[in-house]
Image: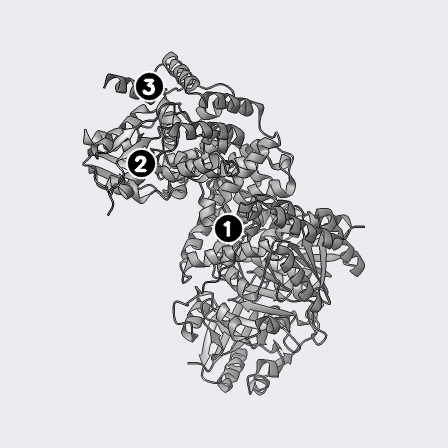
Amino acid sequence: MTNAREDILRRIRAALDTAPVDALPDAAPVRPANTTPRAGGGLEQFVEEASKLAAEVIRVESEQAAALQVAALCEERGWREALVWDWEEIGVAGLEAALAGAGVEVHHGGDPHALEPVPVGITGAEAAIADTGTIVLRSGAGRSPLASLLPPVHVALVDGTRIFPEMRAYLESLGDAAGHVRAASNLVFISGPSRTADIEQTLTLGVHGPRELIIVVYGGD
Amino acid sequence: MSDVPFKERVNAALQNPDRLRAISSGAEAAFVKRNIVLESLPDPDATRDLARQIRAHTIAHLDRYLAEFEANLTANGGQVHWARDADEARQIVLDIATRVGAKRVAKSKSMVTEEIRLNAALEAQGIEVWETDLGEFIAQQAGDHPSHIIVPVMHLTRQEIGRVFHEKLGAPYTDEIPELNLIARRTLREVYLSADMGITGCNFAVAETGSICLVTNEGNGRMVTALPRVHVAVMGMERIVPTLDDLSVMLQLLARSATGQKLTVYTSLVNGPRRPDEEHGPEEMHVVIVDNGRSRALASDLAEILYCIRCGACLNVCPVYRAIGGHAYGSVYPGPVGSVVSPILGGVPAFADLPHASSLCGACKDACPVRIDLPTLLLRLRRETVKQGQQPGWLSAGMKGYRAVATSPGRFRLAARLGALFTRLTGGRWFRGSLPGPLGAWTRYREFPPFARKTFQQRWQERSRHD
Amino acid sequence: MPEPPRNVSLFVTCLLDTLFPDVAQAVVDVLEAQGVTVGVPAGQTCCGQPAFNAGYWDEARAMARHTLDVFGDSDEPVIIPSGSCGAMIEHYYPELFKDDPEYGPRARALAGRIVEFTQYLVDVLGVTDVGARVDASVVYHPSCHALRGLHIDRQPRALLENVRGLRVLEQANPETCCGFGGVFSVKMGEISGAMLHNRLDAFEATGADWVVGVDVSCLMHIEGGLRKRGSAMRTKHLALLLAEGIR
């Protein structure tokens, strides 16, 4: 019984050994640096780009202000329940107290079926990327992927000093990017609320993922 | 995908000008957006050059990167399977489904799973398969096939979709787009929450981390990889890049070329099943690496097609695609890339017409983010169709005759004189009648120009004699 | 700046030779008016593109060998008044003969000598104004092989701009293929016809007198279509327009 893996690898090696010279044009690797960001690359650009994608961006001065802002949102919108990352994972001091003060029942996990009716998910983010208006979330213990996916609204708390001009810069900042990424089961770059244009090329938000993305940015310039 | 001859499919498509207009304007709109958003890159040309080099380098060392990917994903707790062909690939997925007792599968959009005809195989085992990408979901409900690799139901109107939802899902009829999306959302919510297995494709595997990168706008890719207890990703073996840095370059181009966005809403890196200390996420994660003819391409002078990142830009810009739509190609992969990939993966005899269904205008090559020389690949495939006897007898005979005429100045002059005679006998002007046989395809749409009484070379020689 | 070569050979092309000899003569006239001496190597037939494009590479090679023999081994530029034939020789003659020890180097040599007509005038001679006067309106059709294969667009447009009295109009989506594509026009007649139809609508919407281009293959397909639908619009190769304008 031949081994599919060995067969395929053998076929590939044989093909590469005997392929015509012009079969693979440009096969020699060259790495020019070409990604100098255009505009700013900082918080201003992030806010602009995220807003273009129909994310709502709220800037506050501090962690404490961020906590209060989230609580205020819950009150304004009548959210009595929330699916929330573990407090240490969000890393915003005072958030637990603020939400308790707003009378929000907090879930940190649970059966997805039971979590269906929860109106809002609240997470942190480990970074933001300016040129595409993107926030970066890694899954892990206490950082359920469902919080940014299941409820119709996702509120993300972002440290304003963790803005990178572009994805490449973010990856570079990690040092051992591969190790950092592999340490999680899942890493996601989120750019705006869920959308589709599959029907007559007409844009609609919130098909499967959240219909609304509210980004609360604290600190930063 | 179909036994109906290409010509018949084309004629059928041309009977539906409204649908073609919808496809054409959708394709054009997508291309306009692509042009605008590419300009937001600091140096679009340099980025495309770099992306091409990354793909070229990867394919030139494909065995090494696949092995590296496998080692890293396995270390993360994922399981890697290898499939030499479609049968093997289907069997692997079926075996997993059987072992875990899957009754319901939620699928995110994946071209390679359509290529290997996975859905039918699962359904034959009594497993319910739900497409979750909105366009694929609509096509599935309608019993229709996708007509575009990025926008599957570009060819359907909202009224048609409303009727499908009404008939197949029991929803009250509506053609309001927000309402239609809501119906899909509600239906698929239940599917996500109850599916035993999620199946995805793979936009890019990353060798250095053992990750699968999935790119979606709707969030269905995340849903099917977060909720069901088993995740199976099916991957064409060429869909891989060496490092995260390489991935970031490809991601600068994929969404821009496909939909005119800088990035799709969700770009996920799936690194394996959930970790022991995580509550949510799949218990098992599998990747099925599929050859199914790709190594054949690698061994030929068509290998460059393996650089393709499946963005669909070549479809959007192709005047033939815009004239006939995606279904006419009769393949999972339509458009310029489909015309190369289909005969390679499905065999030249089954798809012999596709490489010829192009005027070789080159717009596809201009649009391709990794600058694949599609016209040259099409020409090389046309050579193959001739070698494999797939061209009509009249054309082969005609070409032999043309060769005889064009390798002898004497015979060439004679042929020109015969042409001039034909013109004289038919009125001496542009010919308005019907030319016989296959040449009638010219005169159906055009008049035929008159042959000159004397060729240029004759006049030149006569003038030189007089000087 | 070195003096540009002023002895050239003309590659007639099979279509110009048998169907549009006036265009070939116009190329000669325009070049001679610029002080260029034009030779026409005898015994020319066809570059082999129709066979090559249809996948009949052996037949194409036979025709290409004949063509290589006709043009010999000089250094003289070979002026070719066709974007598609030019692209064939430049891009695909080397491919056809890449493993051929005798014709391989000759194919590469000819590929290096080939210059399209407007390229020669504008880029080699440095001429954008041939002193032509034509009172008419035209729309320029950028043939795909010229445009994308040889990067020819600026040159014909520059020449047109300098024709006194000429109004150059623009059609919608100018860079869309007209649907000729060689054997494609017959083999895939319905698709070719559909593509042609779209282009004809775009041309007619401009109200121009002529569609002007650098490739008679496109132009004869376009004019064939215009005549079929009863339009008064006609086509004209750029060389013929210039030659008529300087007489």
As helix, strand or loop, the secondary structure at mark 3 comes to helix
Q: Residues within 10 Å of mark 3 (few under 14, many from 20)?
A: some
Give the alpha-carbon distance from disc 3 to disc 1, as whole Å: 59 Å
User: Is residue C225 at all visible to an observer of this figure?
Assistant: no
Q: Position of residue C223 (x, y in %)?
A: 36, 28
Amino acid on which the number 1 mark rests in the picture: Glu
What residue did someone put label 2 on? C117
As helix, strand or loop, the secondary structure at mark 2 comes to helix
Q: Nearer the viewer, residue B427 or B416?
A: B416
Give the alpha-carbon distance from disc 2 to disc 3, as whole Å: 21 Å
Q: Position of residue C150 (x, y in %)?
A: 38, 42
Q: Is residue A9 above or below residue C221?
A: below
Q: Residues within 10 Å of mark 2 (few under 14, many from 20)?
A: many
What residue did someone put label 3 on? B458
Chain on which label 3 sits:
B
- Check contact, mark 2 vs mark 3: CB within 8 A: no
What residue did someone put label 1 on? A200
- Residue at (49, 18) in percent of width and height: B436
Amino acid on which the number 3 mark rests in the picture: Gln
Side of C219 where B463 appears, left or right: left
Q: Nearer the viewer, residue C172 or A165?
A: A165
User: Is residue C145 at all visible to an observer of this figure?
Assistant: yes
Q: Position of residue A204 (x, y in %)?
A: 51, 59
Quarter of the figure with residue B74: bottom right
Q: Residues within 10 Å of mark 1 (few under 14, many from 20)?
A: some
- Check contact, mark 1 vs mark 2: CB within 8 A: no
